[in-house]
Image: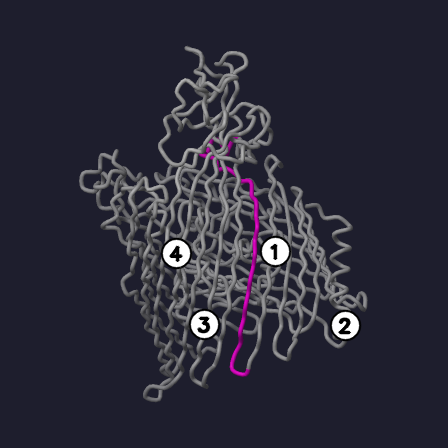
Amino acid sequence: MTITKKHLASAISLATAMTANPLLAQQATDEKLEEVLVLGSGTAFNSSSVTEPMRKQQSTMTSVNALIDNLPGVSVNEGDTYGFDDWSTNITVRGFTTSLDEQQIGTTIDGIPNGGSNYGGGSKANRFIDPANIGGIEVSQGTADIASRSHEALGGTIDYRTDDPLDVRRSRAEVSMGEFDAQRLYFRYDTGIFAGNTKAWVSYSTQEATDWITETAENEREHIAAKLVSTLERGTIKAYVSYDDIHEDNYQRVYTDAQFERFPEDDFLTGEWTGIPYIDQLYRRGWSTLRENTLAYAQFDFDLTESFNLEGGVYYHGNEGRGDWVPPYLVDVTNDGTDGQSEFLGGATAMGGAAAGQFFFVDADGNALAPSTGCESDIVTIYGQAEPQYDPACYPAGAIPVMSYRHTHYEKERSGLTLDFTHNGEIAGLQNELRGGIWYEDATRDEHRDWHKITDATRGHGFDSKPYWVQYDRSYPQETTKWYLQDSLTIDAVTLSLGAKQFLVDVEREDLFGESSNAAIDSDSDVLLSAGLVWETALDGTEVFAGYAENFKAIGDSILERPDSDLDNIEPETSESIELGLRYSGDTLSATATYFQNDFDNRIIFLDNSTAAGPNYLIGTNGSYFNAGGIESDGIELLVNYDINAAFSLYASYTMIDATYIGTGDKAVDAEQELVPGNDVVGIADQLFVAGLDWNGELLYGGISAKLTGDRYVDLANTWVADSYVVADAYLGLNLVDVNPALSGINLNLVVNNLFDEDYLGTVVSGGAWIGAPRTASLSATVDF
């Protein structure tokens, strides 16, 4: 996709046609995010929301995940500024992580569960919402609202909210361009109010960019969405649908501190095809993520009486796609006897079965070749020196290199319903609120892996459409039910709350090839308790709050991916969260101070048969899962947002975290898991500090922010430290109004991320880290009709 004058002219023409009869007396404006920080007023737990200045600090070409990075306790890292790599995306909140390795933070979209955030079959928020359609993001850092719906909320929940349609008709066209060949075209039409009580919008966006290292990736995204809101006498009805289609070429992590120190801007994936498979297995365009996501929901919110409110909704989510790699060999899965290798020559697809080996070069008749005896390879990559079988110099002239294009296919369908009630009344003259609700979801995830021959490994990564091997094909049905009840009683200036919730989750594995046994797990939680206190002090706008909650993560279907493992004694992972804080909210100043403590005590651990620690734990032929160890974290969060005057505002937050591993209680098991009790948790910074200054004038606006991320350990042994770093972002914008009778506004917005081009390690997972994105500038032009 290349944005040309023709594209832009077509968008403007369409927008003008749709606004041929504007409401002359009205001028459409954005449904803006809060200008001051919302600090969860009235709640027994700390939460904070993204503000309008935070939104302006990020280009609309980036992902919605980046918007929360400056909130207290939160750290977000992605492979590049534009969020074009799910593989390297990482979000941490108070010692809990959502990354390639682990998913411990809940995510919802307008209160609808996202279906998991893992790479294989999950979907993070940026798959559902275009950045230009964001209406707000609320981060509950430790304890989410009791009604929050997620399988993964050990460490709080992030709720991403789409913005509602405007009351007046408006068409918007936006063109964005940035470094690394980034381009984006966005169009949205708001109907304004029609039929007396209904309004809607529909949007379309398409964007592309390359990577920042080799500048050879082919990243593309297309997003279509629509929303409708209808206001009735007693409440509202809302409906939303989105479709997202994305192709991402990945970044790769580095595995040693020495690699990063010597090559701080290289992830060692390559941009050119060499014809040597051992090198070309690192070809960036062969490391890809392809996903399509469709989400649709309908919700209602009705005040049935003055004291009774009923909310509910239904939703559907479909997800399909694949992950790609290019192994430097073909797998020998068919016994061809004295004939040539059918995996190379073509033939029937092998369905299931075990690999008999691999072959790396063939002759003209398709017969597998062996390297010359005593040959040593001179080829060296990030994976080290190649063995002889990988080196064309170790084969006779005319030997043909072979490679595979391996696809892991993911597909997921889920549908569900939610129902919540709130009743306000009195008990003995005291104000009382009773809340309750249910959530039900039926989901099925399918996964299969197939291997394709790369048609000509000397020329490029094009592959035969027919696979030579389908390695496995499995289905994972899952059924979820959650109920909750919470009662809140207000005694003078103090509100006390007590709640209970429970998750009932059943997950199964069905082997569609019948090569392994089917399995099922009941992943039911105990009844999880929560309690809270909010005291409205005599100082106007000041509250003291305290909360306790038991949190839960269901056993995921990924646990069932190891056939014949013992699952009998495994239980869901749980955590306990405690918060104590003080918040103030005034006309020009808002501030909060929070102490938190999280105990994650039921971590799921796997031991395979080869471990010396096995006698007490191994039953199944592939090993055993059990619960042991966990994480302890505590710390403080400080935040202040101050409107200096009508034009300037100041924002600052500081977080200090001490997150450490708990041992399993068995030294042999700890050694097998490479755990040292008391060591710091991988990837969690010991401190975060953010400061930002924003200016909002009548014509011009701008701002700058800087964030310090403290030291983080990359390995479990705490021997490799990713050093602290500071990244600054700046933006400058121009707002024009009354430019033309046909236009309601023009906006130009320049954003520079990583202003001082800091070299740093971004996302950290156990044993490796991705390099942070360099300085990246982008410019957006928005026209409203």
Q: Is residue 257 magenta?
A: yes
| Residue 522 location, quadrant | bottom left
Which residue extends farthest right? 740
Which residue is under mark 2? 21
- The Cα–Cα distance between marks 1 and 4, rounded to whole angstroms, is 29 Å
| Residue 758 location, quadrant | top right
Up/down of 364 relative to 731, above or below: above
Up/down of 234 relative to 348, above or below: below
Residue type at mark 3 is: Gly
Say which of 142 and 759 sits in front: 142
- The Cα–Cα distance between marks 4 and 2, rounded to whole angstroms, is 48 Å
Which of discs 4 and 2 lies nearer the camera? The answer is 2
Residue 672 seen from this side: yes
SS under mark 1? loop
- The Cα–Cα distance between marks 3 and 1, rounded to whole angstroms, is 35 Å
- The Cα–Cα distance between marks 3 and 4, rounded to whole angstroms, is 22 Å
Which residue is under mark 4? 152
The magenta span reads 233-262
